[in-house]
Image (tube, rainbow, N blue to C red):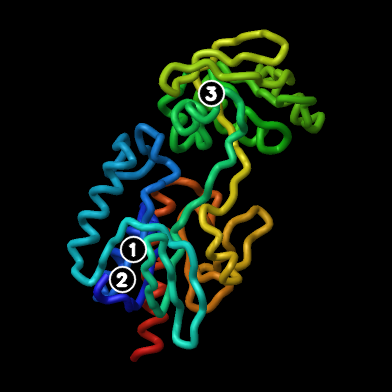
Amino acid sequence: MENKKFEVIIIGGSYAGLSAAMALGRSLRKVLIIDSGSACNRQTPHSHNFITQDGVPPAKISEKAKNQVLQYKSVAFINDLAIKAEKTENGFTVDTQSGEKLVTSKIIFATGIKDLVPPVPGFKECWGTSLIHCPYCHGFEFRTKKTGILANGERAFHLASLVNNLTNDLTILTTGKADFKPEQFAKLEAHRIPIIETEIAALEHQEGQVKNIVFTNGDREIFDALYAGFPFKQHSDIPLFLGCELTEQGYIRVNEFQQTTIDGVYACGDNTSRMRSVAAAVASGNLAGAMTNAALTKELF
């Protein structure tokens, strides 16, 4: 790149990053977005619960957003991978995989998280399509269908209470001894929600659509959808190297202004919140952009 100095570098150019860039571009801030093209929902066929974009493929939403953001001439975008960032006396340097060394006053991390999908046959292929995480994002499309909840304890009970409103054919799959309080067992029984404790050996599917769950005892049962929540890690290690604190759940700790525990560093989107949706990412990105602009204004005015 010819000019390597920016007011803000946004690492991650999906929904949250693009939303932050729009807020900054509209304030004429010199911004660079660095994105490697690995959005976590790239396998999901349609995005839902985002007003004006309901049912639109995620890639089309981000493509349209990118085109709109880049109409603001102070915003630039490169397809690259940020691999390192260091604090300097006046801001930060950011190194990329292609060999660029860039300078910026502020950084916004919109890097998302990486799901640690278990190596069970069919899980990876179905994740985001019919092996799903959120009833608000996916539940309506599987209403009245045979649905499983792959969880145990409080999480399983919470999901069952939400999904029960969408289907009368619901089963909890604990893959081990069920761990519910007596009153929870009673409520699940009252709502006729059975529990299967047998471990899952595989998901039989067709192009990501679950057809059967195969259990380790050889049993096989038809399902149309399966809710699950898997462990995750931060998609980028750079915030940790800079010293950003994580929450107990593993998210980047931010305050109500999307500011991390490191001065001059902001974060937004899935890397900061359990509210994992396109709409939530866009909202937090918009706030991160505005608050970063406010910090710059305070320093320069």
Residue 13: where, in percent of width, then height? Answer: 36, 56
For label 3, the crowd category at 10 Å Cα-Cα, with few meaning under 14, some 14 to 19 and many 20 or more, is many
Mark 2 in CB contact with mark 1 (< 8 angstroms): yes
* Residue annotated with mark 1: 33
Residue 222, located in which quarter of the rendered image? top right
The N terminus is located in which quarter?
A: bottom left
* Residue annotated with mark 3: 122
Residue 278 vs residue 195: left or right? Answer: left
Task: Tell me the distance, in whole angstroms, between the alpha carbons under discs 2 and 1.
Answer: 7 Å
Judge whether residue 74 can be spotted in this image: yes
Callout 2 amino acid: Val
Task: Tell me the distance, in whole angstroms, between the alpha carbons under discs 3 and 1.
Answer: 34 Å
Residue pushed farthest right? 182
* Residue annotated with mark 2: 31
The C terminus is located in which quarter?
A: bottom left
Mark 2 in CB contact with mark 3 (< 8 angstroms): no
Which numbered dot is residue 115?
none
Residue 29, located in which quarter of the rendered image? bottom left
Q: Nearer the viewer, residue 6 or 102?
A: 102
